[in-house]
Structure formats: structure tokens, C-alpha cells
Image: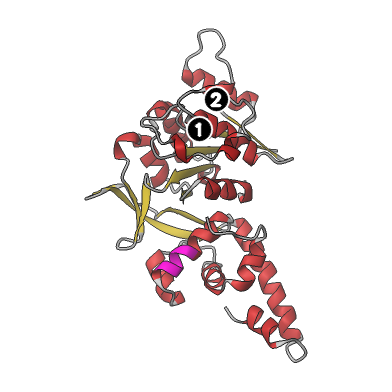
Amino acid sequence: MMKLPEDPVEWLSYNHPGREVLQSVSDGKEHAPLELRKACGIHPETFRRAVHTLELYGLLEVHATEGERLHRVPKGWGIQVSLEITPQGKHVLNVLQGFAAVVRQHVRSLPRATKERWLTA
Amino acid sequence: MISILLLGPTKWERPTHSTVPSDLLARARKDDAGSRPEGAWPIDVRRALCAVMARPDVVATVMEDWPSQGHEGPSVKFRRIEQEAHITHYVVFWPLGGRLHGLVWELSDLAHRIMDGKLDRRAVQLFVQRGVADWDHVTEGYIFSETENRTEYFGDLLRLRCPVFVWEDYSELTFALEHRQWV
């Protein structure tokens, strides 16, 4: 497993795809992975890794799409899934949005790297 | 207080125990793993995972650590443990080489309770090892290939939208369980 910081806020502070995905599910609704990936404009493998890491931190959950059942596929049984933000994910996103708001307040006086980190997602 | 019942296989259907790291097994309260010549069993791993999940406000247990009373059957024992341990959440652990057939009654009971609105779907979380299930980039879904080792009721829990997490290795599983917020 790739070494991850204990704090998901730290990981999200430098992982823009992860932040983009989490922000895109912030409405609390279920999202189809393909539509979400296209909306985020992220490469499939980058998207898969971002979703997986968000799951590792318990910020995003994957579950079967409403009304879906297991169906036979050549390699076994398949099931369509949806992505949904968890309550913990909402809290973490609030913290990130709070940081971004503070950075915006001090945008003139902060270093470029700080602005790029917090105001780009 | 969060109280978790960690369900899963007791023994391997086929040997894959070499992938279980010894530092994880060392966290088990009952270190039976060292006494088994063939290596750790899934029950040893589950006991270790209970220790991983433990926090001041979280306790986790396995059914095997609760001795049967009198002639009680598995279903009565399951209900008794739920009451005595004040179980609030359930984790279903499905590693490669393990089968869920010993959990038919338990998984069906959980599925029925979710269907009846007596249990929140998020109270039952499914942790499946990669290889048992894999992400399919074409359908943007999961494909379960260990079909002979599942039960129909595991499929029901999936259909009822219980969260499913597909883990790559035990370090990932440990990280995920340590960071899970049980709500």
C-alpha cells in the first residue's frame, strides 16, 4: 500500500484529483462512477486511485446502485455501483472549504504555493 | 458506544495464509496462530482485526469467542451475542481463499432486518479482498469471481446498498478499519 498520511485533510491538501472527486459528490446524492469521472475530467486510473483512497479514509462509500442486482458476466457476477459521500467526508470537506475561504481572505499576502495548494481543485 | 460483530470465515477453503502479515496477527488477543502448524486461520485474522478496530468508544468481537450455552443453535447464539454485546454494527470480512457458507443464516437475518427497516444499511459493511471482487473499468462496477464461495444473502446485502470496500492487502484493510467512522 502507498504510504498515506494519517490525516485525510493533509492528503487532500496536495491531492487535487481526490479533492475534485470529493467536492463533486458533496451534494450527498449517489453518483455513477463514469459520469462523475467525466465531469471531473480525470484519467480512469487516477480516478480509480482517488476513489479508493477516499474510501480508505472513510470519506466516500461505494455501494450497489439502487435497484441493481448481481448479474452474470463472463468472469463471474457483476454489479453496478454508485459513489456517495459519507458523513465523515462532509465534515472533512467543510474543513477544506474553511481553509480555502481563509486563503481567499488573505490572497494578496500569501505565498503563491499556498494559494495554488488551497485554491486549485 | 459502538460495538461491532466481525463476521467471516473460520478456516480457509484453500490455503492463502502466507499473505497475512505476522505483525497483524500479533495484535490478536488469542494468539492461536502460533500454535497452528499450517499457519493462521481466518478466525485468527478476524481476532487481530478486532484489536485493530478497538478504540475508547469502539469494541469489536467475533462469534467464536462466545462459548455456546447448552444446546443453543447458531441462530440463537447469534441473537444472544447481539444482545449481550450490544452489537450496533457488523463487518463482513471476505478474504481470498475464504468462503461465506457458514454465515448463511446470519447474512440472511441482517438482509431481512435491512429490508424491514430495522437496521440501517450502513451498519453492515462488506470488506472484500481484491481477487474475490475486482473493479471493472468497462462496466464501472465490481465483478465477483469467487462465486462458489459466496452465499445468495451476500448478494442481497450488496443489492441493499451496504457499503462495500475492496482491499488490496492487509495493510490497506488495517488502514481502512482504523480510519472508519462508525455512524
User: Which residue is outermost to the front?
Assistant: B37
What residue span does the magenta drawing correspond to?
A45-49
Q: Position of residue B108 (x, y in %)?
A: 41, 32
> Which residue is pictured at 54% across the width and 27% down the height?
B33
Q: Which residue is mark 2?
A: B63
Q: Is residue B94 visible?
A: no
The numbered dot on residue B7 is: 1
Quick one: label 2, few (<14), some, or many (20+) residues within 10 Å? some
Disc 1 secondary structure class:
strand
Q: In the picture provided, is B25 more to the left or to the right than B135? A: right
Question: Is residue A48 a member of the stretch shown in magenta?
Answer: yes
Q: Is residue A18 above or below residue A71?
A: below
Q: Main secondary structure of the magenta part?
A: helix
Q: Is residue B48 visible?
A: yes
Q: Chain of mark 1?
A: B
Q: Position of residue B79 (x, y in %)?
A: 54, 23
> Which residue is pictured at 55% across the width and 42% down the height?
B123
Could you say which is closer to the camera, residue B158 or residue B171? B171
Q: Quadrant of residue A86?
A: bottom right
Question: Is residue A100 a member of the stretch shown in magenta?
Answer: no
Amino acid at circle 1: Leu
Could you say which is closer to the camera, residue A72 or residue A54? A54
Pointers 1 and 2 in contact (CB under 8 A)? Answer: yes
> Which residue is pictured at 50% across the width and 65% down the height?
A50
Q: Is residue B53 above or below residue B78?
A: below
Q: Position of residue B24 (x, y in %)?
A: 58, 39
User: Which residue is outermost to the bottom?
Assistant: A108
Amino acid at circle 2: Met
Disc 2 secondary structure class:
helix
